[in-house]
Amino acid sequence: MLSPVSEATPPAGKERIYFFKRIADGIPHVDVLFQVGEGELLPGTPQYGIENGLWEATDGLFVFRQTGPRFKVLQSAVSAMFEEKGTSRAVVREHMALKTAAFVGNRDAHGELNILKLTMSGNFFENPTGRQRDMILHRGKWRDRIKQLALILGLNMRTFYDGGGRKATPEDYGNWAAGHCEKKLSTFVVYTLLHRFGFRVKDLTKEDLDLLKNTLMERGLRPRFEIHLTRAPCGSARKPGCCIQFVHRLGYATGVDFEIHSWEDNVILDGTVPPRPPAKGANLEIVAEIERQRAVNLDENEDQDEDEESADFDFYLASQYEDNWRGIVFDGFDPAQDEPAPDPRRQPSPASTISPEARENFAKTIQRKFGRKEKRPPDDIIKPYPPTPVTEAEWSQIYDRSASASQQPTATQTLGKSTPRDNKLAAG
């Protein structure tokens, strides 16, 4: 039995957002859930002893409990379904765990968040189904549009993942980074705004970005969009990449404000999807080197004959990122930190203090058992003297007794130098 549910009334822009990944009847599902209430389980309820559970109370309304008697009431805002025919269940489960889910939305005059599009990272889930399939951004054309925008914004998106297991060609450069959700959704917003104002474009240019920015300024508009995703965006101090730079530069070039909100701790799995392992901390020195290379734009395939105005534009965009990225990136609705907050459940045991003597003894043991051993000098081998030459008759008597018994030797040829004894035997 449940106690009365109290309505959750968070301040404007402070919704609690959850992502629910599951596979039902062989079909992958991704639900975006908003917390709309909370309550407390009474001790006599059958579900009181079940922790970390999610129950669907009615169509699109869920009860979520982690630990303790408190529970949350979650309502589904978008339910994405994908039909992957000819793919094994194990492969689908793996991609559901690894791929990032994200949506973009904006707020109305009352501060309510409205979802515009939902997408999955990569290009595996390209066959949406269900009644809300029009809400899913899935077509492959967005990858080419993102790569074109990256050239305009002065970003080098080339990685060693671009070949997809084979040697990458120049046409493949940037494919992996172009599949990230932040780039997809921000590019979708820019194309949608251009079409909204009557500008039909297929391949964006710098002039199209300037046109959109000037149009918004003339109308006195400053649109703001929020991108919410299941993983921290790449491009910060904790995670290398260029998604934050892409979104930030695109926002400056078009006059559109973007915010990126990550909800890593609010991803719910129903057991049919394996949990994704936590990301390893980035090497700050490597990240700094990557960002330095991106800033100078070392892409070999990019045309270097840019006009002076475009070069100044790229330089200004590159100079803006380093100081302003914290203004658009959030952990939920809290400001993002350079390093993630430590989770005691994921921390290893404290390191033991090892004495110098123990280290030295351990090194000696390893050297003695597995190290290279010195070769001892070879032993001196005393070679025997050569045998004394003998006559042919004596040779026959020793090794051919049957022949020597039937006949006497007639020849006294020696095998070596003759001696007085040999001559005497031969004369007798």
Image (tube, rainbow, N blue to C red):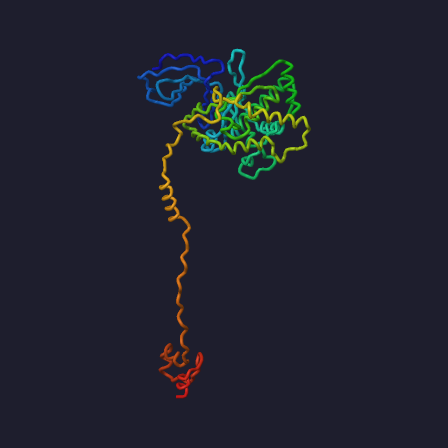
- State which quarter of the image contains the N terminus: top left
Pinpoint residue 211: horizontal percent, then vertical percent: 66, 20
Q: Residue at x 60, y 25 (%)?
A: 317
Pinpoint residue 320: horizontal percent, then vertical percent: 58, 24
Q: Residue at x 33, y 22 (%)?
A: 49
The quadrant in which residue 137 appears is: top right
* Nearer the observer, 235 or 272: 235
Pinpoint residue 115: horizontal percent, then vertical percent: 52, 18
Horizontal relation, residue 353 to residue 139: left or right: left
* Nearer the observer, 192 or 287: 287
The quadrant in which residue 298 appears is: top right
The quadrant in which residue 159 appears is: top right
Residue 316 against residue 38 in the figure, above or below: below
Residue most toward the left?
A: 44
Residue most toward the front?
A: 356
Residue 163 against residue 386 in the figure, above or below: above
- State which quarter of the image contains the C terminus: bottom left
